[in-house]
Amino acid sequence: MNRKGFTLIETVIALSIFSAVVLSIGLGTTKLQRSVSDSGLRTRAFARADVQIGMARAWPTWGTLENLTGTPYNGTKDGLITSTVVQVDTLAKKRIKRLTVTVTSAVPGALAIPVKRTISIAAP
């Protein structure tokens, strides 16, 4: 008996293997897309924090540096929330202000770890 073609069991096994490969490729593509999206959001958050730090470095008066904590300088834009905290460090009997900028996401879970930048600014 000379048969040509595949049996039903061979066809089912081949389709199962093919389906598993296609599903794993789809899952990998979804993970890659999510990773690229998260990377873009983190990049924008770091840029926002760097802008705020640059503004603090260029601030004209050391005594009014606390004004950076105000709403006009800490807005919500592009789904990111910026907050700035200015603390006076008096432990070493020196006039130093520590500025911490924190950027979080307005969308819960979009930016799992907030971006934080801290600098110290000494009085002139």
Image (spheres, grey):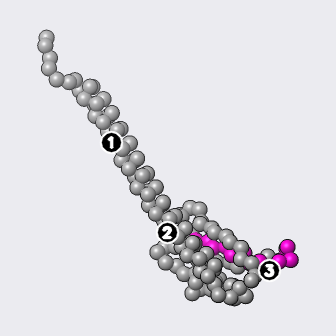
In the depicted view, which residue is nearer to us: 99 or 79?
A: 99
Task: Name the residue carrying label 3.
Answer: 95
In the depicted view, which residue is nearer to us: 41 or 96?
A: 96
In the depicted view, which residue is nearer to us: 72 or 104?
A: 72
Of the 4 image quadrants, the one containing the N terminus is top left
Which quadrant of the view contains residue 74?
A: bottom right
Rendered residue at 74%/78% (across/down): 122
Q: Which numbered marker is on residue 44?
A: 2
Magenta stretch contains residue 69: no
- Name which of mark 1 and mark 2 comes first in the sequence: 1
Residue 10 on image: x %, y %: 26, 25
Q: Is residue 119 above or below residue 9?
A: below
Task: Name the residue carrying label 1.
Answer: 22
Q: Is residue 92 left or right of residue 10?
A: right
Q: Is residue 44 above or below residue 97?
A: above
Tell me where the magenta segment starts and ends, as one range: 90-103
* Mark 1 → mark 2, Cα distance in angstroms: 33 Å
